[in-house]
Image (cartoon, rainbow, N blue to C red):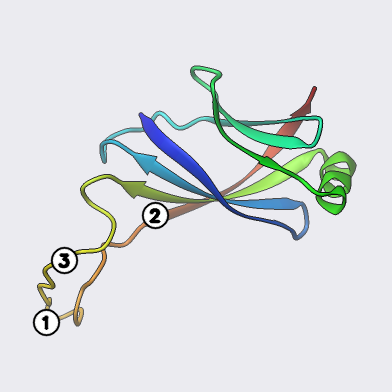
Amino acid sequence: MVDSIGIKRVGIRDYLSIDLEVWMNDPDDMDFKPRTKIEGNTFSVLSGSSGEIMASIELDDEQMEAAERDRLVELRIKFGVHGMHGRLFHIHPIIADGKAKKLANSNWKTVQPIQFD
């Protein structure tokens, strides 16, 4: 189950591009089905399974124009799991890898349609 979603950056590339940081409760959680919608100037990321709004941000005029033109958004998602990711306080170097300070995060990129209300 998704614990929280944070919007880190909004930009324009080929489409409206939004960087998300998604925190999961357990490494075996597979319940992440993002849906996107724009209501007024507010962009929201919803949970596909429950329908609740997980994160929102206000878009400026240029970003709204790109969203209305393409009606698609590129989501660039960085996943983290509570208890596994984040800063380690005790560094245990692995000889083969050098000094490991953080565990690797998985990344995901997808293009989603935007629902306008």
What kind of element bears circle 2?
strand
Please state which of residues 62 and 114 is positioned toward the viewer in this rendering.
62
- Label 1 to label 3: alpha-carbon separation: 18 Å
Which mark is nearer the camera, 1 or 3? Answer: 3
Residue 89 is labelled as: 3
- Label 2 to label 3: alpha-carbon separation: 21 Å
Asked whether, in this view, residue 82 is left or right of residue 59, the answer is left
- Dot 3: few (<14), some (14–19), or many (≥20) neighbours within 10 Å? few
- Dot 2: few (<14), some (14–19), or many (≥20) neighbours within 10 Å? few
What kind of element bears circle 1?
loop
Residue 95 is labelled as: 1
Q: Amino acid at mark 2?
A: Ser
Please state the horizontal and vertical placement of residue 104, each as a whole percent of the image.
31, 62
Say if 114 sits above or below 111 in the image: above
Give the residue at x 77% y 52%.
15
Say if 27 sits above or below 63 in the image: above
Residue 106 is labelled as: 2
Residue 13 is labelled as: none
Which mark is nearer the camera, 2 or 3? Answer: 3
Please state the horizontal and vertical placement of residue 23, each as a whole percent of the image.
38, 43
- Label 1 to label 2: alpha-carbon separation: 23 Å
Rendered-image quadrant of the C terminus: top right
Asked whether, in this view, residue 56 is left or right of residue 26, the answer is right
Q: Amino acid at mark 1?
A: Ile
Give the residue at x 76% y 41%.
72
Q: Amino acid at mark 3?
A: Phe
- Dot 1: few (<14), some (14–19), or many (≥20) neighbours within 10 Å? few
Please state the horizontal and vertical placement of residue 33, each as a whole percent of the image.
51, 30
